Amino acid sequence: MKRLGIFPGMLALVAFAAPVLAQAPYPPPPQAFATIVRQAPQQSSFTLDRSMLAAADGFLNGTSPDGHRIAAGLNSITFTNFHYHDFADYDGPAFGSLNAAYEASGFHHLVNANANSRAPMLTDVWLRTQGSMVTNMVVLTRGDRNMNAITVDCNLRPLDLLHLSGHFGIPQVDASAVMVPAPPPSSAPPRAAVPNVATGPIAPAPNVAPDPPAQNAPTLHKHGADDPQ
């Protein structure tokens, strides 16, 4: 499983997030992420419920008091995988609509500030808090032919999320990632302006004049002893 892009500095940010409104609408289910790709995926999903997590706790945490406390704060973890035979064609407006639905449900959207055009995966994180506690987390990774959504229903402190990495099927933390609030859609650069392998092959820009043919470089002649002066 891919490494998760969560940096400890992001966790401190969550502690100061605004509390969730009591009447916030219910967030979209993990299967809704299929709408942000134009192709139909091969889809699989499974959920670890509270009883399964409690059974795994003894094997994973041993006698660790912190581990048992964190496991007790987990209600369920759902893993949803989307696989595509061809390059996944991500739909920007559809992603914006889904993100708006999560934000309307009280989630805070975070992205990796260190992402670049060579990154093999794009990582988005949505967090919903109540007071100083995290009640829901959604991690979405998008690649060439695979998209994975991990949804966590919990009641944990922000720093507990760091300890979850590498347990219960949650990926390891990527120390090079710095998760920051996602920019508003109006200030985000056009998708085509930021090529990424997760968008599939990048088509050449239309109506671009071809580069002028290169001029032959002058040949320098080195005089020998028998050359005329």
Image: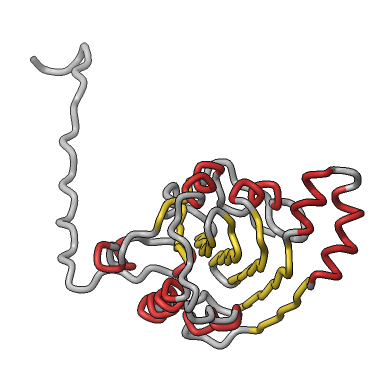
Question: What coloring was used for the rendering?
Answer: secondary structure
Residue drawn at point x = 15 percent, y = 56 percent? 212
Residue drawn at point x = 83 percent, y = 44 percent? 65
For the C terminus, give its image quadrant.
top left
Instruction: Using the image as rendered, state which of residue 145 and residue 49 is in the foreground.
Output: 49
Instruction: Using the image as rendered, state which of residue 195 and residue 101 is in the foreground.
Output: 101
Residue 200 makes an appearance in the image: no
Q: Residue furthest left?
A: 229
Q: Position of residue 190 (x, y in %)?
A: 28, 67
Up-down relation of residue 85 to residue 8 (above or below):
below
58 with respect to 150 (left or right): right
Q: Residue furthest top?
A: 225
Residue drawn at point x = 60 percent, y = 78 percent? 30
Residue drawn at point x = 50 percent, y = 42 percent? 9
Q: Which quadrant would residue 222 be assigned to in this image?
A: top left
188 with respect to 82 (left or right): left
Q: Position of residue 85 (x, y in %)?
A: 60, 80
Residue 172 makes an appearance in the image: yes
Q: Position of residue 149 (x, y in %)?
A: 61, 70
Up-down relation of residue 211 to residue 104 (above or below):
above
Q: Which quadrant would residue 213 be assigned to in this image?
A: bottom left
Up-down relation of residue 193 to residue 104 (above or below):
above
For the N terminus, give its image quadrant.
bottom right
Q: Position of residue 29 (x, y in %)?
A: 59, 81
189 with respect to 182 (left or right): left
Instruction: Using the image as rendered, state which of residue 193 and residue 55 is in the foreground.
Output: 55
Q: How many numbered marks does the figure carry?
A: 0
Q: Which quadrant would residue 71 be assigned to in this image?
A: bottom right
22 with respect to 59 (left or right): left
